[in-house]
Amino acid sequence: MSLYLEQIRQLVSLQRVDDAIHDVEMELEQAPKELEALKTRFAAVDAQRERVLEKLAHLKEQEKRINGEIDDDSSRIRKSRNKMMQVSNSREYQAMAREMDNMERVNRSREEERAALLEEKMRQDAALREVDASWADLKAEMESKQISLDARLEAARQKRAELEEMRKAAGAEVPRPVLDRYEFIRRRLPHPVIVSVTAGVCSGCQISIPPQTFIELQSGHKIINCPNCQRLIYWVEHFKEDNADPEAAEQAATEE
Ligand SMILES: [Zn+2]
């Protein structure tokens, strides 16, 4: 295998390890976000539940007040009725009857208010049952997600540590100046560093490389950067991972 192809192979191997590291980094970044999204949803439902509970507490207070008032009125009406039995003067009797009418009217409007209150309370009770169901579901989901997240993160960290070891080994194979070029790009560009060129198109940026550069790339003598995205490029015919046939690649590289 030519030196050029050997270096491309080494860089692609290093890239594969970096691909795996990149996936793990994404997992480490993404997994907590899923829990965060769930926490946000839970917080919204929790706030909604609090509002319903507040309304119910308020309704309960009002109910207590109005029950007290209705009781007071009833005993007052009862007393007045007893008094009415004792008056003999008809004028006094009529004044008392008017007063009783008034009290009964007030009492009726209180009964109506109480009925409206009870109706509202039933509505809020139903709302509470509904919100309670999704509240409990979300809480359970959040708790299990927290547990699985810890396991996921732990697994990802472990995998990253293994990959870092593999990376050291893969990097050690690459000659220093070539590795430096790779690392230089890795620090400055988004993943990945080395990409294939198929039918004259860079798979890193999906842009055609100039014909002259493509001819140079096909000749397979030195490692070239994509003139557009600056990633390291190799001709797909030189290096196919799936049907890796070094002989064929070698031949392609030396044919001019
Ligand atoms: Zn490119």
Image (cartoon, rainbow, N blue to C red):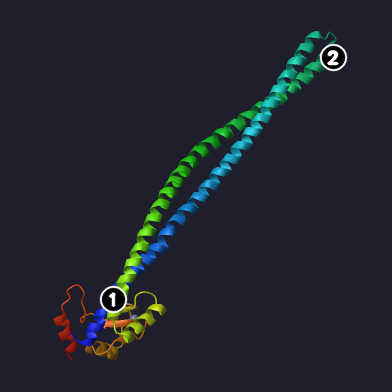
Q: Amino acid at mark 2?
A: Glu
Evaluate if marks 1 and 2 touch, with contact meaning CB atoms under 8 Å apart: no
Looking at the image, in which quadrant does ligand 1 appear?
A: bottom left
Q: Earlier in the sequence, mark 1 or mark 2?
A: 2
**In front of the other: label 1 or label 2?**
1
Secondary structure under the numbered disc 1 in the rendered image: helix
Q: Residue 99 at what x, y percent from top left? A: 79, 20
* CA distance for labels 1 and 2: 111 Å
How would you rate the neighbour count of disc 1 (Cα within 10 Å): few for under 14, some for 14-19, many for 20 or more? some
From the viewer's perspective, tell me whether residue 143 is left or right of residue 181.
right
Query: Which circle marks residue 92 in the picture?
Result: 2
Q: Residue 40 at what x, y percent from top left? A: 49, 53
The answer to which of 84 and 16 lies nearer the viewer is: 16
Q: Quadrant of residue 15?
A: bottom left
Residue 71, above or below 156: above
Q: Residue at x 53, y 35 (%)?
A: 125
Query: Which circle marks residue 170 in the picture?
Result: 1
Question: How many circles with numbers are drawn on the protein?
Answer: 2
